[in-house]
Image (spheres, rainbow, N blue to C red):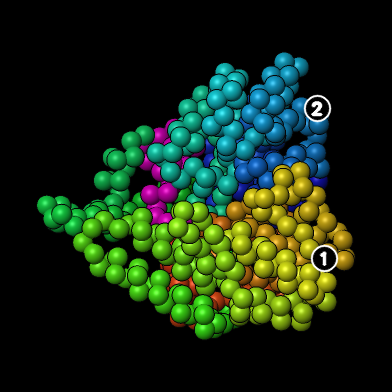
Amino acid sequence: MKQLWAHQKRAIEEARGRDYFALFHEVGTGKSLTLLNILRNVYKREGSLLKTLIVCPIIVIENWKREIYENTKVNPSLVTPLLGTGKKRAKDFEKAIGACKERIVIVNYESLLIKGLYPLLFGWKPDVIVYDEAHYLKDIKSKRTRAAVRLSDRASYRFLATGTPVLNTPMDLFGQYRVMDCGENFGKNFYVFKIDYFYDKNEGFKTSPKYFPDWRVKKDSWERFNAIINSTSSVAKKSECLDLPPFVRKPIYIDLSREQRRVYDELKKDLISYLNDKACVAQLAITKSLRLQQIASGFVVGEDMDGERHEIQVKDNPRAKALEELLKDLAPNHKIIVWAVFKNNYKTIREVCEKLKLKYVEVNGEIKNKDKFANVDTFNSDPNCRVFIGHPNSGGVGINLVASSISIFYSRNFSLGQDLQAEARNYRGGSEIHESITRIDLIAKGTIDEVVQIALSNKQGISDKLLKKAIKEL
């Protein structure tokens, strides 16, 4: 078994004897190992292995299986990861519990929506449920969160783990706590919770046709949130609990090519004209903002006369040239992670790698799950594999990429969760093998890239403020 860090030991002791508990530990601080030790104490308390359900992102299922094999004495035959089609998962589950109901079953969050599988999980009635990356449950209105609530209300023990419990607003806490504590802290009704902890700044304009609610946290709610977090969770930040190397942020500002700037400015002008229109243009604004990001990253999306969608790569792309120069300079001595949020970007990054004769692997939505695991292993173990091309959602959760000391964010979106998860793939326990960890952001000057950067920074500020008191009391 791996040696435990001080923050892990503290969290394990705080969770001892409790029916529910949350680990708000930043990614890379060893949440899985902490949870396994919490489960060990539960099994000791009950005198045997219990029916245990672990719910996590699909790419983490393999990691959980390995962690259980390497760090517990649970018989491998009693660990059942469910993968494949819904029909296959249901069949594998029935076969497993037919042999022995008391076992550990590992599923992804989408399994909660599979009609042929969810009723079987519900009927199994797990004694213990672990929700890894629990921010997937922040939307209490989603079918996924409602399914999790129904499962959790039948369980005796419920544990959460996430490094990003708040991604947009403290309202994100409600769904996660409802799943964990069955409504003990924030209640069972989201609307009552919202009125209790928040106020609508635009309340006085309800009669206006332009009215939209602007929910803000009440002044006394911050302390109330912190009090609940302190009493029901463990909070850990990498900077506070790990002896990690310095983390260096390096923005690299690039210009748009002349053609890019022309197309970008035309679309931007079009967007502004829509925003000034009196009609409701929210969806148009979102779509056009996305198009601005795509143009800045190096391609244009358009439609022909028949309405068929086309993607056209920008021939003169300064972003691709910047990446080429970075890889030419860094790849001979460092393994490099390149993150991108658009499918079209992968083609550009591949072309750069092939031009420089750099071996690379990919983990994104186009890669099969079994190949994703193999590609991660290849990147970490093959000295000739110099570049990892990933999407923050597909490859930015639950995997270990500490073989690399440098990550390049080729393109980004407004998702704070994806951004933080991607950043933590190589800035985590184990990265102390490097002298420093460097994050490079490619940012097109005078474009929406700069807006994205500010927006993500502001969202991180909300999360930090909410957990500030809890962190101080570590």
* Residue occupying image coordinates x 77% and y 79%: 328
* Residue occupying image coordinates x 52% and y 73%: 296
Residue 291 is covered by the magenta coloring: no
Residue 107 image point, x, y percent = 64, 35
Q: Nearer the viewer, residue 13 or 137?
A: 137
Disc 2 marks a residue whose amino acid type is Ser
Residue 382 image point, x, y percent = 87, 61
Residue at the left extreme, as displayed: 207
Q: Is mark 1 on a helix, strand or loop?
A: strand
Q: What residue is shown with label 2?
A: 77
* Residue occupying image coordinates x 41% and y 77%: 265
Residue 427 image point, x, y percent = 68, 65
Tell me: residue 414, above or below residue 54: below
Q: In this view, does 460 lie to the left or right of 367?
A: left
Q: Which of 51 and 335 is in front in this view?
A: 335
Q: How far apart are marks 1 and 2 (CA)?
A: 37 Å
Q: How many labels does the image show?
A: 2
Give the number of the mark in front: 1 or 2.
1
Quarter of the rendering containing residue 52: top right
Of the numbered discs 1 and 2, the one sitting upstream in the chain is 2
Residue 184 seen anywhere in this rendered image of the structure: no
Disc 1 marks a residue whose amino acid type is Lys
Residue 159 seen anywhere in this rendered image of the structure: yes
Marks 1 & 2, CB-CB < 8 Å contact: no
Q: What residue is shown with label 1?
A: 359
* Residue occupying image coordinates x 45% and y 58%: 305
Write down the region rendered in magenta: 167-187
Residue 370 image point, x, y percent = 76, 43
In which quadrant of the rendered image does the C terminus lie? bottom right
Residue 185 is covered by the magenta coloring: yes
